[in-house]
Structure formats: C-alpha cells, structure tokens
Image: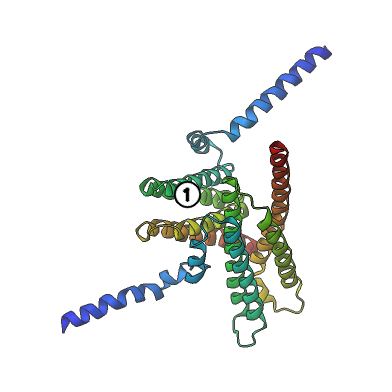
Amino acid sequence: MIRVWTRIGLCLFPLLLLFSPAGAQRRRDPLTPVEIDQLRDTAQDADQRLKLYVTFARARLDLLEKVRSNPKVTDRGQETRNRLQDFLDIYDELNDNIDTFVDRKADVRKVLKTIIEADTEFQSKLRALKDAANLDKDEVKKYEFLLTNTLETVDASVADHRQLLVEQEEAAKRKKKEKS
Amino acid sequence: MTIRNTSIELAILLAVVMAAPGRNNESLDQLIARAESARIEDRPALCTEIAQRELDSAGQLYQAAKPEEARVAVENVVAYSDKARDASIRTGKRLKDTEIAMRKMAARLRDIKRNLAFEDQAPVATAVDRLEQMRTELLSHMFGKKDNK
C-alpha cells in the first residue's frame, strides 16, 4: 500500500511543481509544440523558416484581436498583455533568425519582401490598438508600456529590414556584374 | 601657427580614428577588464555587451557540438546580465535599454534551446527564466519610480 502511495506521489510531484507559484512565474514558450516542430524542419531553409515566423507572429496578433473582442474575457488588460508579449517574443526571434541567415550569407531578398509587408500590417494593427478610444484606464495600464515597446521594436525593424533588402539587392547586382 | 594648429587637429583626428575601430575589435577579455574598472553608470552598457557576446559564443559552441563550453557561456550570459541589471537599478541608468536587451537575449536563448538535445536544454531554460526574472525586476523598478514621482 505504501508503495502505491509512493508511486502516486512520484507521479503527482511534477504536476505540483508545474502549478506551484514558482512554476507559474516561469514564462512559457511563446510557440506551441507543433510550431516548434515546423521550425525544426526548416532549420536550414531561410525562406521557409522566416515565413513561418511571420505566420506565427500574425497568428498572435489575430488572437489578440479575438481576445479583445470576446465579451467573455474577464481580465482583458492582462490577456492583451500576454498576447502582446507572445507576439513580441516571436518577432524578436524572427529578427534573430534574419541576423543568423545574413551572417551565413544567405540570400533573403524574396522573404524580406514578405516580411516588410507583414511589418506594415503589424504596425497598423498595433497602432490601431494604441489609438483605440474609450478604453478603461486600468485595463490600458496593464499593457501600455509593452505596447509602446512593441511598436518601437516593429518601427525600428521595418527600417532595418528595408535597409537590409537594399544592401542585399546591391550585393546581388554586384555579383551578377562580376559573373558577366 | 596655422600649420601647427592644423597638425594638432590632424593628430587628434588620427588618434580618434585609430581608437574607434580598436573599441569595436576589443576582445571579450579586454571588455570584461574595462567593465570591472568602469564607473557604475557605464557598467549597464558594458555588461550587456559582454552578455550579448557570450550569447553569440554560446550559440556557436552549441552548433559546434561543444555543449559543456556552451553551458559555461550561457552561465556568463546570466552573470553579466545580472551585473547589468544591478548597475542599472543602482544608478537608474539605461533601465529600458537593459530590459530590452534582456528580452532579446531571452528570445534568442529560447530559439537555441529548441534545437538542443533534451539533456542539454535545462541550463538554457534556467537562463531564460533568470533573464525573465531580471526583466520583471527592471520593469518593477521603472514603474515603481514613476509612481513615486
């Protein structure tokens, strides 16, 4: 009987840790296991991998809009904050991955155009949230700073992505000239 | 007199031009030494740069299948981030920059972690948690200050 209880205890212990306050403080991965698998399959393919990041980031903003329009959501401020944080984490990873592929001298011109289009879409969605009128002050307080940070990050990144595209196109032209 | 002034100006310009790339090419050891002796106000930026360089090297070491050395680099990421956080909070300087840098480093570590073998993931996950904790402390400090005003 004692052995049965020991086994039950051993099974429950990890669950207890997971739901303990210390466990709850840990920030979960912003990506789902399925998304992580998809990324793993595209580790060497810049176009596919970066497109996936754009898709995941877009999905987080879509989710954010759904959360905000759902009347059943009780703590809209906190939910907005969580979704925004997920978006920003994924967007940071997108930028990191761009840097990695550029360091490897990968040609990312094609996917950069997709990214720049997405940047514009993200900017307008985030700006719409920032400019939304008649919102509860306490609700806004919960995500205001993060939203400003996110907008600053996206604004700075758009400029970087455009600059990178110009540089890569110039490099491609030079390469073509050298070949001919 | 004019020639002498021009020579002095040229000498200063030359010194500045020569010193600038020197700083960019500064080795990690040199940077660490500079951080140790720097004024506390300058430490957040220096320690953040060290943490970022350690993170670059951790990524390269994991890719080169050197998990033990990479783990040490990850520990250094946390250690120098902690120094940056501490100096930032004590001086009230570069709080936002330090927080943003930590957010980006945590994102990069999460990406690194996902590509690792299961047995190598734990130290990276711990590092991510520590960076997130430091971010929270920096944010609390920023907002705490605002409330006091």
Indicate the position of residue A13 as horizontal and vertical percent values: 31, 75
Indicate the position of residue A61 as horizontal and vertical percent values: 64, 72
Indicate the position of residue A95 as horizontal and vertical percent values: 61, 55
* Residue B54 as seen in the image, left or right of residue B117: right
Chain that bears disc 1: B
Q: Between residues B118 and A77, which one lies in front from this camera angle? A: B118
Q: Between residues A173 and A129, which one lies in front from this camera angle? A: A173
Color style of the picture: rainbow
Q: The residue under label 1 is which amino acid type?
A: Gly
Q: Between residues A61 and A111, which one lies in front from this camera angle? A: A111
SS class of the residue under badge 1? helix
Q: In the current view of this chain or complex, which residue is farthest to the front? A: A180
Quarter of the rendering occupied by the C terminus of chain A: top right
Quadrant of residue B46 within the rendered picture: top right
Quarter of the rendering occupied by the N terminus of chain A: bottom left
* Residue B94 as seen in the image, left or right of residue A172: left
Indicate the position of residue A160 as horizontal and vertical percent values: 69, 51
Reading the image, the residue beneath label 1 is: B59
